[in-house]
Image: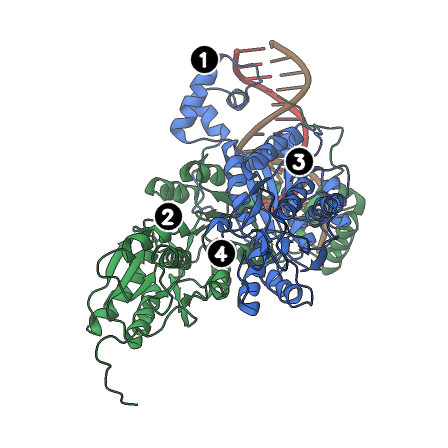
Chain colours: A green, B blue, C brown, D red
Amino acid sequence: MRKPDRSSTSLRVTVKDLARDLGMSTATVSRAFYDETTIAANTRRLVLKRAGELGYRPNPLARSLITKRTKIVGVVAADLVNPFYPEVLTRLTDRLQAVDLNVMLITAGPMTSMDDALTLLLQYRPDVTILLAATLSSAAADACRRAGTPLIFINRHPADENSVAVTCDNVAGGAAVATHLIDLGHARLAYVAGRPDVSTTVERWNGFAAVCETRGVASPFCENAGTFSYEAGYAAGVRLLGAAARPQAVFCGNDILAIGLMDAARREFGLDIPRDLSVVGFDDIGMASWPSHALTTVRQPVDQMIDFAVDLVGAAARSERPKLTCFPGTLILRGTTAAPPRTGAAPPVNA
Amino acid sequence: MRKPDRSSTSLRVTVKDLARDLGMSTATVSRAFYDETTIAANTRRLVLKRAGELGYRPNPLARSLITKRTKIVGVVAADLVNPFYPEVLTRLTDRLQAVDLNVMLITAGPMTSMDDALTLLLQYRPDVTILLAATLSSAAADACRRAGTPLIFINRHPADENSVAVTCDNVAGGAAVATHLIDLGHARLAYVAGRPDVSTTVERWNGFAAVCETRGVASPFCENAGTFSYEAGYAAGVRLLGAAARPQAVFCGNDILAIGLMDAARREFGLDIPRDLSVVGFDDIGMASWPSHALTTVRQPVDQMIDFAVDLVGAAARSERPKLTCFPGTLILRGTTAAPPRTGAAPPVNA
DNA sequence: TTGAAAGCGCTAACAC
DNA sequence: GTGTTAGCGCTTTCAA
């Protein structure tokens, strides 16, 4: 076994060093770093002052041995290639850092399965684990429960009703899209589903389809893209728009699907958007507002959602169990939706 | 002070438990988990088997107290909104996880400065710290040195010649772009710089300008976008293309700048690309190959670069000091570059 | 209000 | 090849 490199041993200050320096016991020094302890105000001041000078900070690794709390938040990111998640991750880590929490990131990729990666993470005893667009095998969920780390899902409703989740109101979002498209006068609608087995896919469809039914519009066709990616959107576009009765408007499971589908519409079928086809996405990623896309979409209130999730982290660490929470989205009208061209007899003009 | 939540105390198995269960000493159990120790092969087998059954894994936090190694790799990501970095980060964490290393992620954002975030990270004593497109204040670099964490820069050449860096050959990349554009017949070239103070910006320019000089083409105009973002590219496009002598071809500091600039060219000036303007990027992010962009660009060999960086992590942890390493990029020809339209007298036909 | 002492979970000398 | 012991850096009883 390699022995620790004593030569370059960090001249790291420890409690002992600081205690000796101050002529106090290590216990007193330690107490200075906790609010709820009995220590003379003046002693604390002294300790903190000298600690600052010497650059002493309690070692969280050693501390965790006793307190059982690591100040580590595990973040499991399933799909960083969808630009929505880097946006979320950036704000999330920033906010967590601001409250003195560190992010341990795990991803599932070609080399490691989600379950293996999670096992690795759990060794570090994260106080809380946040799942970004990730779903867990029941074995993995079990492992988390045994390890005692509360789970917070972002953008997913877990099947397990015990977990905490923060999501956008996907049902209402889907409904708003349907209302918008029907108001414009579209009758042949379609939905492009991403991963079929996740809550966002199902809920957005539910809201969309429900309004179609209420408004007496034919039930929308559902094209399954299989996953949330540009390529999947493009392929779905090829299938959907090549069909005999092309839809007049399509609601895509998220923005990146919508962008893929629009590229297919233009390149493979020479369609003009929105004249020949209306398209709506979901998320409002940065790219959606670029002139080259100008995508009408449902904006998720990312900032609020993340801030709330960070509050949940605190609550979860205190073993509180808040209910799952759902934030309203906002339909953002841009350039990819318009009324269908009039065909046959023009409708009576009544305005 | 809150006392550890004994009620829900994880029934986590410890060395002691396992040792008692097996009727061995804790030392023996511990030895089973290290290759370079003297332990009977059969004993090791027994220990590992029972450990598997009971779900025992040594607590890395406790272990680190003695070994001074945490198996934590700090990753500092400066700009996750540029899609290049999520691509890199995904592969990086995946590879690190595969060799049993965990990623602690820090970002600089509105709430926390880079230096504060780094301080937070260093408390956890990462074995190595990887900087993704990040530059460090000299105070921060000092802090890292004092904390004894080796630094690996990805996509940046640090000023400090002590650090290790893995980069793409930006000079050669810039040169290849210039050669391509000049071969096509362009004479009025421009460069759009991202952050002016980083090595990639400077090196790409150097390679680009050097070839112009060699080939006897007028020194390219340099437009400073200030940062590597879509918006900055768009704004730079507005300034650059609105000028009196519009360039025939522009080399952008990276793909996302190029995409912004192209949107400006089309929307603000009604230009057709590549007929009226040739555009080249750098990185070859996924988006560059989408039909809506079809961007000619220099591909960074991300996979090789990351795999190499992961090897460096191992080397750095062993206190070796490899030299900084530079991988060749590849010019990928797509649809945004073409010969300029002939103006005035057609050149003599000689083919 | 403070200090002495025990111990978190683990590894590494050193003896056997 | 294995067990005993000490101790990593820290917090937390308990007694003073």
- Nearer to the camera, B309 or A271: A271
- The residue type indicated by label 3 comes to Cys
Q: Quadrant of the N terminus of chain B?
A: bottom right
Q: Position of residue A306 (x, y in %)?
A: 49, 61
Q: Mark 2 falls within which chain?
A: A
In the image, are marks 2 and 4 on the same chain?
A: yes
Give the label on residue A213, or none. none
| Cβ–Cβ under 8 Å for marks 1 and 2 | no
Q: Secondary structure at mark 2?
A: loop
Q: Are both tags, 4 and 3, on one chain?
A: no
Badge 4: residue crowd in 10 Å (few <14, some 14–19, many ≥20): many
Residue type highlighted by circle 4: Val
Residue B118 on image: x %, y %: 67, 49
Q: Is residue B16 left or right of residue A198?
A: right
A95 or A148: which is nearer to us? A95
Whether marks 1 and 2 lie on the same chain: no
Q: Secondary structure at mark 1?
A: helix
| Mark 2, residue position | A135
Q: Residue, x 30% and y 51% (percent of image)?
A: A196
Residue wearing tag 3 = B326
**Mark 4 → mark 1, Cα distance in angstroms:** 45 Å
The residue where tag 1 is placed is B42
User: Residue A110's quadrant in the figure?
Assistant: top left
